[in-house]
Image (spheres, rainbow, N blue to C red):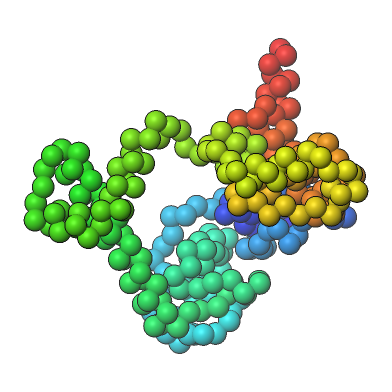
Amino acid sequence: MINSLVAYKGKAARIAGQNTHKFELEFADGSTRNVREKDFRFIHPEFTKVNDSCAQADIAILDDFQEETLTLQEITEWLFDEYTAQSAWCTCVLVEDGLYFYWQKDKIYVRPAEQIASIQAKRDAEELEAKTLAHCVDNIANNIFDEQDLAYIKDNQLLIEEKIQSIYKKDSDREPTIDVDQSLYDNFISSKDRKICDQIQHLSVDQMNSFRPNFEDRKLSKLFLNFKARNYPETLTEDEQENWFEIVQSRVQSGENGYLSFEHFEKSLN
């Protein structure tokens, strides 16, 4: 599998090495990460740089495969008449989009035509709704109204109020961070979650082993993992140890989310 093209969390990567339990993945920006085999998806045995600019796929061919489950290579050859790293990546992009296919473990399920039509109709409706809402809010901001706006405002008062409030929020310029430690600054903790946090502070090591907090805010469950890893590493399960290792590795090797990597730290000393 060395030098194969794989997908890891939506990113293309090359398998650069392998040890007993993990594979070293190299990404387009030169960063690397050691991951388990179950955490990436095999795309093509020969790595080449790929992109999301894909040739037009022969979608009409899918009529012959409705409700069938095929391999990535089979789907790629039918859609693009060839199985290259780029065409296989394009198939992967289509599958991730979810309109025509979805993953069934390592194979691909072809949706029936009526299901595709239903999904597309829902997407079209959502897109039209978003455009109509944006148009209406812009007109409100500019004190311009037409009959279409008035009818829409009458039927969607709550939605418009929420949209306007989101525009004028004091913190609207700061996008929520994907880093769970930094995400504490994105919003306030509910009173229920605050009580659970207070409870955690009084747990013994033995209690920490079996404690499973039922947070309303899901990011707090990830913060709980980080808390245990920093203060009670002996309580981590094998999966939690793997997750914590990947978190630390991404920060010190790649400098993800603004963290100082080893490389930039060494440069700062010079």
Q: Toward the viewer: 108 or 202? A: 202
Q: Residue at x 65, y 51 (%)?
A: 215
Image quadrant for the N terminus? bottom right
Task: Please determine whether, in this image, residue 109 is positioned above or below residue 163.
Answer: below
Image quadrant for the C terminus? top right
Q: Residue at x 31, y 53 (%)?
A: 159
Q: Residue at x 25, y 57 (%)?
A: 156
Residue 32 appears in the picture as rendered: no
Task: Please determine whether, in this image, residue 87 is positioned above or below residue 31.
Answer: below
Task: Please determine whether, in this image, residue 138 is positioned above or below residue 211.
Answer: above
Q: Toward the viewer: 172 or 165? A: 165
* Residue 196 x, y percent position in the rendering: 70, 46
Compared across the picture, whether 36 is left or right of 31 comes to right
Q: Toward the viewer: 30 or 183? A: 183
Q: How many marks?
A: 0
Q: Hey, which quadrant is residue 143 in on the image? A: top left
Q: Residue furthest left?
A: 147
* Residue 30 x, y percent position in the rendering: 64, 39
* Residue 15 x, y percent position in the rendering: 71, 53
Q: Toward the viewer: 33 or 242? A: 242
Q: Hey, which quadrant is residue 38 in on the image? A: bottom right
Compared across the picture, whether 228 is left or right of 29 comes to right
Q: Residue at x 52, y 67 (%)?
A: 95
Q: Residue furthest bottom?
A: 64
